[in-house]
Amino acid sequence: MSTQRHFRVWRGDDEGGELTDFTVEVNEGEVVLDVIHRLQATQAPDLAVRWNCKAGKCGSCSAEINGRPRLLCMTRMNLFGDDETITVTPVRTFPVIRDLVTDVSYNYDKARAMPAFAPPSDLEPGEYRMQQVDVERSQEFRKCIECFLCQNTCHVVRDHEENKPDFSGPRMFIRAAELDMHPLDERDDRKELAQAEQGLGYCNITKCCTEVCPEHIKITDNAIIPMKERVVDRKYDPVTWLGRKIFRRDQVKH
């Protein structure tokens, strides 16, 4: 069974653009990405959209659907009323390249600045051993598909472009938390680095990043809040603070 549905899709580039109206055929069981592909095939062959797996695992097809950050391939058409107009726009936080495609290199720049996993110097690859409880502790964070919807919805950079140089965002905070929890990571300054260089203090835990995560990672509760708490413990607990001063462990490594 097919119906005709009203879509408004943003068309343009880095110099500007506008919402364009389309009437598109929609079939039962389809997702928004199916309709965008049909739109390309029938009415707008030059429409730019980024996608890859169409299974909610590559994170490529991030967009905003009726103002909410979503994956095009995981947003079913039956979520919307039969007479509802579906508006599809590029994610707002990153610069538009063309149509629904944005420049997300900000995220890769922040990832490159993240200190890598630092294994014990006295172990060779293949000799690493972890308890299952330690694996499970950070397994949740490894589910991230890097769709960057959490980065896009975070108001720290969504509403304040000037914060981008100093703020790495929730995607990077869960990476920092994962490494901080890793029993074989030799660095002991992940928390301080997140606070001093990645902008952890900018986050006021509104949980908007958690709400849009397609993998249902509890970004705020399980990564950001624990990292903030451990930073406070180290920085303001008098016993911990004195011990770090005595043993000169209060400097962020580079």
Image (spheres, helix red, strand yellow):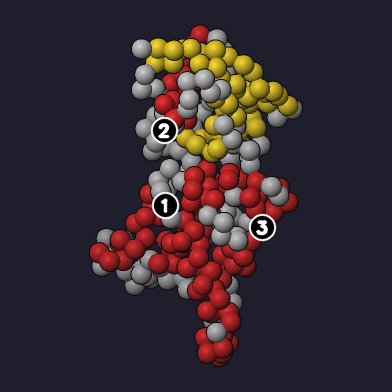
Q: Earlier in the sequence, mark 3 or mark 2?
A: 2
The one nearer the camera, 211 or 45, is 211
Query: For numbered disc 2, what is the local secondary structure?
Result: helix
Q: Between tags 3 and 2, which lies in front?
A: 2
Query: For numbered disc 3, what is the local secondary structure?
Result: helix
Residue 96, given in percent of the width and then of the height, sits at: 65, 32
Q: Between tags 3 and 1, which lies in front?
A: 1
The correct choice, above or below, for 46 with respect to 99 in the image is above
The one nearer the camera, 33 or 1, is 1
The correct choice, above or below, for 196 with respect to 247 in the image is above
**Image side of residue 87 versus residue 188, left or right:** right
Residue 122, given in percent of the width and then of the height, sits at: 34, 72
The correct choice, above or below, for 105 with respect to 49 in the image is below
Crowding near the residue tagged with mark 1, few <14, some 14–19, many ≥20 C-alpha atoms within 10 Å: many
- Which residue does the numbered mark 2 point to in the structure image? 74
Query: For numbered disc 1, what is the local secondary structure?
Result: loop
- Which residue does the numbered mark 3 point to in the structure image? 166
Q: How far, Cα to Cα, is label 2 from label 1?
A: 16 Å
The one nearer the camera, 137 or 18, is 18
Q: How far, Cα to Cα, is label 3 from label 2?
A: 32 Å
Residue type, numbered disc 2: Met
Q: How far, Cα to Cα, is label 3 from label 1?
A: 24 Å
Residue type, numbered disc 3: Asp
Residue 90, numbered circle: none
Residue shown at 52%/86% (left/top)?
Answer: 240
- Residue 60 appearing in the image: no
Residue type, numbered disc 1: Ile
Could you say which quadrant of the image residue 78 lies in? Answer: top left
